[in-house]
């Protein structure tokens, strides 16, 4: 098997509800986010040309509007640069960590719901950023659950690239936290790096699937978090 490449793209900047987990928020890209998405297509075309990638003509994205918009604008820009058509396929497997029945509530609202429920213990102070904590409500996932889901989807879709003469690179548009946890599940990031790093809006991070089935970071910069920076993904 020749090496293959997974191009991970976090959605562009969007109209996120304040003080609320990003999760399944339904809001659109800002004007800045739209520009970021268009620029991503040009950047990926340049990377593909430089590294000799044969891009699959399908961009895979989550079903959140911000991810679909990013994929669509990225695809339009990429197609114009490469002179070829690009299709967009949505899949729930690329979603951000779900907070289940508490989706789109603010952090204080979530904490109050849990405090008022006689069946549940108080939430730990780091519940939002704790990789292994799962809210005690229907449909909720931990960040690691989401990372495992995304990692399994990436591996499945990369395994579909079986033709040695066909595409050797795929674009995945999703969400920062679930993609970072996926990178850990794939063996690319150490556990401690998950909190230290983030992803720039609509800037590609390229992972390489080696011939022996292991993964490595190939290109594109992770975003280094400042010590007091608040996670919004």
Image: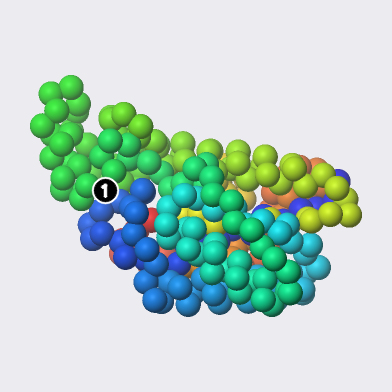
Residue 83: x and y, percent?
74, 74
| Frontmost residue, 127 versus 19 | 19
Q: Residue at x 26, y 48 (%)?
A: 104
Query: Is residue 110 left or right of 73 when viewed as pictured?
Result: left
Image coordinates for residue 58, horizontal then vertical, percent: 67, 56
Q: Is residue 161 visible?
A: yes
Is 111 left or right of 222, judged from the image as shown? Answer: left
Image-quadrant location for residue 91: top right
Image point (60%, 70%), residue name:
76
What element does badge 1 sit on? Answer: loop
Q: Residues within 10 Å of mark 1 (few under 14, many from 20)?
A: many
**Residue beneath the point at 23% across and 44% down:** 125
Horizontally, is 213 left or right of 190 in the view?
Answer: right
Q: Residue furthest right?
A: 165
* Quadrant that contains the C terminus: bottom left
Task: Say which quarter of the image contains residue 18.
Answer: bottom left
- Classify residue 74 as left or right of residue 100: right
The answer to whether 36 is drawn above or below residue 11 in the figure is below
Quarter occupied by residue 41: bottom right
* Colouring chosen for the image of the structure: rainbow
Q: Give me the residue at 79% from left, 56% from top.
A: 167
Q: Which residue is mark 1?
A: 104
Count of number-bearing discs: 1
Q: Is residue 164 above or below residue 206?
A: above
Question: Can the viewer see residue 41 in this picture?
Answer: no
Residue 155 percent location from the top left of the image = 67, 42
- Name the residue furthest left: 116
Closest to the observer, 80 or 7? 80
86 relative to 79, above or below: above
Q: Position of residue 215 (x, y in %)?
A: 69, 49
């Amino acid at each position: 098997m020749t090496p293959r490449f997974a191009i991970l793209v976090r959605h562009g900047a969007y109209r996120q509800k304040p003080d609320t987990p990003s999760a399944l928020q339904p809001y659109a890209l800002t004007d800045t986010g739209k520009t970021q998405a268009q620029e991503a297509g040009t950047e990926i075309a340049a990377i593909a040309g430089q590294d000799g990638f044969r891009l699959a003509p399908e961009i895979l994205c989550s079903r959140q509007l911000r991810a679909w918009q990013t994929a669509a604008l990225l695809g339009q820009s990429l197609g114009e640069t490469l002179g070829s058509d690009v299709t967009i396929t949505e899949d729930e497997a690329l979603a951000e960590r779900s907070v289940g029945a508490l989706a789109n509530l603010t952090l204080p609202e979530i904490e109050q719901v849990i405090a008022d429920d006689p069946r549940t213990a108080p939430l730990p102070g780091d519940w939002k950023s704790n990789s292994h904590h799962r809210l005690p409500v229907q449909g909720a996932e931990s960040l690691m659950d989401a990372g495992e889901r995304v990692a399994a989807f990436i591996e499945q879709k990369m395994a579909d690239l079986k033709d040695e003469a066909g595409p050797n690179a795929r674009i995945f548009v999703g969400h920062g936290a679930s993609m970072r946890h996926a990178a850990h599940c794939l063996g690319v990031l150490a556990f401690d790096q998950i909190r230290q790093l983030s992803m720039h809006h609509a800037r590609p991070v390229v992972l390489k699937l080696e011939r022996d089935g292991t993964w490595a970071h190939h290109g594109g910069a992770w975003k280094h978090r400042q010590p007091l920076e608040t996670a919004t993904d």
